[in-house]
Amino acid sequence: MTRDRLLQILAPTVVGLIVLAGWSAVVSWNAIPVYVLPGPAAVGASLWNDGPSLFGSLWVTLRITAAALAAATILGGALAILFAQSRILELSLFPYAVILQVTPIVAIAPLIIIWVNDAFLALLICAWLVAFFPIVANTTVGLNSADRNLIALFRLYRATRWQQLLYLRLPSALPYFLTGVRISGGLALIGAVVAEFVAGTGGQETGLAFRILEAGYRLQIPKLFAALILLSLTGIAIFALLGWISRRLIGHWHESVIPHEE
């Protein structure tokens, strides 16, 4: 294990342990009630005792997140390719993509849930609306950032528009696209949780957001913290997984990933 890799593991671990120790000390010294601020031990006990229900709910949220990210990746990438092929299409449709991005999902989620009869599909649409814009924006920039000299060379050799797209623009846009996917991974999780908060449905197919609401209503604050920790760890895992995939795809040739010697 290299020195840099060891530091990447040890540094955040030490900081996390310090934060946990300070948290536990503050709760203990001030005798803060568990229903106001539970200590790390109480949260850990809740995570252990309520683990089966929390992990079952996490699986529901993960399914929505994965489906939304897949839809955002496919549709966002396809839309960006259309924009790169037609300036008129980009000028006509891109402003509407911006409008969807800047419109708060909590404002339109109730309408989507009312209009769409299937609960899973409604939550999927809400999460997709949050996740797709970074992929569209980043990929569009990447497709339009191909080297102008190489474009001129392709035209000199009479390459077709699709040959330029396949052999020049898409490889040039790949790092931008993967960056957009990494950003959208976390946003898809946020969108799924926000949609679940708005839907507020219980039952067997219950996401983590409902468990958080339920724990808050019942003043089960350790369970609420346990659910929040699970969401945070899930977001970190999604970002790490997408980062690993990105390094596998472009790590051997792109400057942003190749280690630099000092």
Image: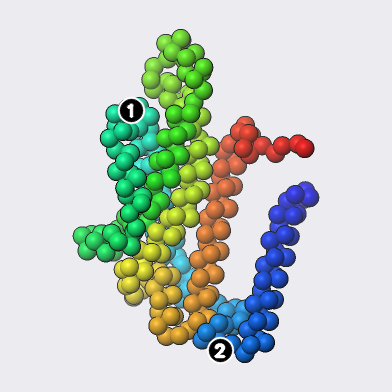
**Of residues 80 and 91, the one drawn nearer to the viewer in this rendering:** 91
Mark 2 is on which residue type? Pro
Residue under the point 68% across and 61% down: 12
User: Which residue does the numbered mark 1 point to in the structure image?
Assistant: 87
**Residue 201 coordinates in the image, percent (x, y):** 32, 72
Earlier in the chain: of badge 2 and badge 1, it is: 2
Relative horizontal placement of residue 174, taking residue 69 as reference (left or right): right
Secondary element under disc 2, as helix, strand or loop, is loop
Colour logic: rainbow
Is residue 93 visible in the rendered structure shown here?
yes
User: Which residue does the numbered mark 2 point to in the structure image?
Assistant: 33
- Answer with the quarter of the image where residue 46 lies: bottom right
Mark 1 is on which residue type? Arg
Residue under the point 30% across and 61% down: 107
Q: Is residue 36 above or below residue 176?
A: below
Residue under the point 58% across and 36% down: 250
